[in-house]
Image (cartoon, rainbow, N blue to C red):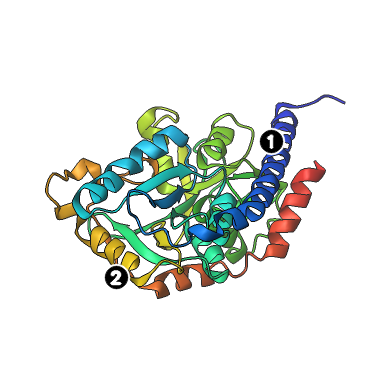
Amino acid sequence: MMITPRRRLTTRIIRSMTAVFGLVVIVTATLHDAVNAYGDEVNRDGSESRPLQVMLIPADTGADTTLDDFKPVFNAIEKNFGLHFELRVGTSYGAVVEGLVARRVDIAFVGPVTFQQARQRKAAELLAVAVKDNSSSYRSALLVRKNQDINRLSDLRGKLVALGDINSASSFRYPLAMLLKADVDPVTQLDRVVITGSHSNALAALREGHVDAAGCSLAAYQKAINSGAISTGAFKVLAVSPPIPNPPLAMHPGLSDTVKKKLTDAFRQIHRAPGVSPEMIRGYGGDRYDRFDVEFPQREFDVAIDQLAPVTPQLISSIIERSADR
């Protein structure tokens, strides 16, 4: 039987996902095994000798770039408010959640879905949400190539759809929710979902013609155009999600009230602090923001997660199994 480019792509992706899932299991086990070793350090207070541990979800730009994006604001807080931090990037969205649960992480930059996962496990509470142009939200989208005869979500029946990380709100959960709302069952009515692991991988699969549609954030799509990874006008937007709260900074509930207040005060004021320039207030993917909102309502995240209720664990499991069968 002839092995098509699509089949080769799918095989590579499944192998990669298998390796990633295996790594997550190892990381999770390691974090839980190490919790006793770090149990005495839950009184980290942000002093120079006991810096607060910060973990960031991985971005398409790579770990080093992600650290470079976040270091300026944390360095500015250290200089202006006396709090000390150690930053690192998680190997996956799930690894960041496990770091919070194992109490090895005090502050995390997470997606809306991973924030909810950590919160359900009593390992996270809201610290701050970035604001740009008076907005604290972003959107997910499903994209197709402009030359395709696909004009509505129902036209995706029988098609291949590339999505990102299974814990990503905008590159996985919301695209599925939009399909379900359009009465398109992603398990039984699509050819299948190809799980690529990231926004950029999903876009690349669509660009190369390996799939018929891709799910990602509109911001990731625009960055791909700006970087030249995608030609302007090559894709068209098939559907856009409702506004999603920006990925938040979360803090562990076990931090002392004193540390929590210091963090809240710092993120509330950092954009006005001496020596802080606008380009220092950056975040995920290098996006620049105006300030941080430390009073952003938790209910906005609750509403966003409620919109994802049809995307059940059982549905996700079925999608993964069906992808692995090909």
Mark 1 = which residue? 16
Residue 280 seen anywhere in this rendered image of the structure: yes
Specify the quadrant of the image occupied by residue 209. top right
Q: Position of residue 305 (x, y in %)?
A: 51, 68
Instruction: Give the number of the disc on residue 295.
Output: 2
**Cα–Cα gap, marks 2 and 1:** 40 Å
The tag earlier along the polypeptide, 2 or 1, is 1
Q: Position of residue 285 (x, y in %)?
A: 39, 41
User: In the picture provided, is 2 more to the left or to the right than 265?
Assistant: right
User: In the picture provided, is 206 more to the left or to the right than 71?
Assistant: right
Amino acid identity at mark 1: Ser
Q: Position of residue 16 (x, y in %)?
A: 69, 36
| Local secondary structure at mark 1 | helix
What residue sits 71% from the left and 38% below the top? 19
User: In the picture provided, is 14 more to the left or to the right than 101?
Assistant: right
Q: Are marks 2 and 1 in contact (CB under 8 Å)?
A: no
Query: 242 or 250: nearer the eye?
Result: 250
Q: Position of residue 135 (x, y in %)?
A: 28, 60
What residue sits 65% from the left and 55% below the top? 32
Circle 2 crowding by C-alpha within 10 Å: few under 14, some 14–19, many from 20: few
